[in-house]
Amino acid sequence: MFVLPVHGTIDQSMLYVFRRAFREIERTKPSAVILDLDTPGGRLAETREILQWLRSLPAETPVYAYVNPDAYSAGAILCLGTKGIFMSPGANIGDALPILINPMSGNVQAVPDDIKEKMISPTRALVRGLAQENGYNVEIAEAMVDPDVEVTIGPVSCPPGKLLTLTAQEATAPVPPDGKPLLARAVVDSIEALLPLVDLAGARVRRFEEVGAERLARWITGLGPLLFGLAILALVIEFKTPGFGFFGITGIVLLAVYFFGHYVAGLAGYEEMLVVLVGIILLGIEIFVTPGFGVMGILGIALVALGSILALIPALPRPPVALPGLDAITLDAYLVGALWRTCLTAAVVILGGWFLGRLLPHTPLYRGLVLEAAVGTDRGVVAGAGRYDGYVGRTGTARTALRPAGIAEFGEERLDVVTSGDLIDAGRAVRVVHVEGTRVVVEAA
């Protein structure tokens, strides 16, 4: 028997726990699932995905809710999606009116009258459908969502203009004539005390909690566009410098961190990692093996972009499970957000590349890296400070690929040269544009 915590705001980070939990539930097929709720509510999008996961469970794995001590807003909606609600002493449930949150300040934003009904109507349909499906009172469910719904049942009365919130005693109060509880089955002190009431006495309890990796994944996914963009930039710089060193290691580490976070978050799988890896390999072949830029490069870029988009789309229950009154959540619902984050990644790469192209070649660190990697005097390269001033304006031939450092030949002399960041293939004509001590800077002639 699994206990899934719904503690705090229902948001993306909570989904990380649920996605991992439902992968385990699919594998172990527990006798029941209990939601342990203490939440002020949260986003409807995340609530809908959790409901969809709950509804994907087989009939032999019923879901129950234990309100300990509060289930407001989205938490109350989750309770209506279970087969039975139980309350702790002093618990409360209700107040599920949809609200707008200002994305800048994080405060509640006033809802204009012309869109208020458009916001309430789908949520009202959702709770009404959940109540009908699981045997709860429809009027009670609607009164939690819509302040215009008036309800008086047994000891509970909610006038127009108010949202219904029930205490543990009110939720479990018997309603004439059949004495059926108003909403919740019983008040219990703990989940262990709940088990005999659902024929699970003696069942082994397994609790899921947010682990450190999931807390880390919350930060990684939040910084995802920046991490992925910096990884691509580092690998591009590595491709343009001979050998393998700092930038290559940095790019690989950033990619590993990026995909680790998205894997823990239930977004990226091995397939997405493989797609990106193949794309990077094709780009490497295009740069190192084949001249120019053609099919390999285009295909590599396409695979990297495809993998980064797929790594932002979660695996959802198959087949898609429709919610009462609403369509099933499909991958399309996440596509816009994935494309938006991919555009942010592209912006990081473009702006970062422009910035590094102008600044990095002139820094001592970069010059040291590329010149240290270049071929030394043991291969016939002439060294010595102060003797290159006469080469400015001379034209020669690149004897190795300049990425951006390499060797160029001027008459019978071979010099260690470096470009300003451009990649020049072997055999191309080059011209010396300026000299800084022993640093000979060339461009394509």
Image (spheres, rainbow, N blue to C red):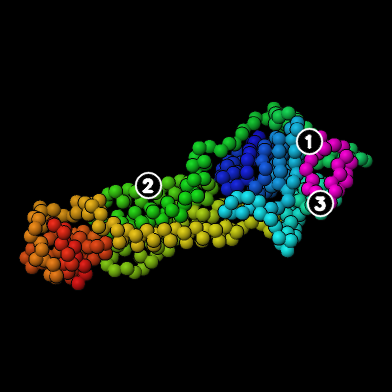
Measure how far apart labels 1 and 3 are at the Cα level.
23 Å
Pair 2/3: label in front = 3
Magenta stretch bounds: 151-174
- Disc 2 residue crowd, few under 14, some 14–19, many 20+, Cα 10 Å: few
Which residue occupies 63% across, 53% down? 101
Measure how far apart labels 2 and 3 are at the Cα level.
56 Å
Instruction: In the rendered structure, find residue 168 and report the number of the disc placed on it.
Output: 1
Q: x, y percentage for residue 394?
A: 12, 70
Disc 3 marks a residue whose amino acid type is Gly
Which residue occupies 86% across, 44% down? 157
Does residue 155 belong to the magenta stretch? yes
Q: Nearer the viewer, residue 134 or 184?
A: 184
- Disc 3 residue crowd, few under 14, some 14–19, many 20+, Cα 10 Å: few
The first of marks 1 and 3 along the sequence is 3
| Displayed quadrant of residue 75 | top right
Disc 1 marks a residue whose amino acid type is Ala
Q: Quadrant of the C terminus?
A: bottom left
Q: x, y percentage for residue 372?
A: 19, 51
**Label pair 2/1, CB-CB below 8 angstroms:** no
Side (left or right) of 24 relative to 122: left
| Displayed quadrant of residue 207 | top right
Placement of 247 over or under 61, stated as above or below: below
User: To which residue does mark 3 refer?
Assistant: 161
Which residue occupies 79% across, 46% down? 164
**Label pair 2/3, CB-CB below 8 angstroms:** no
Q: Quadrant of the N terminus?
A: top right
Instruction: In the rendered structure, find residue 253 and report the number of the disc placed on it.
Output: 2
Asked which secondary structure carries label 3, the reply is loop
Does residue 91 belong to the magenta stretch? no
The first of marks 2 and 1 along the sequence is 1
The first of marks 2 and 3 along the sequence is 3
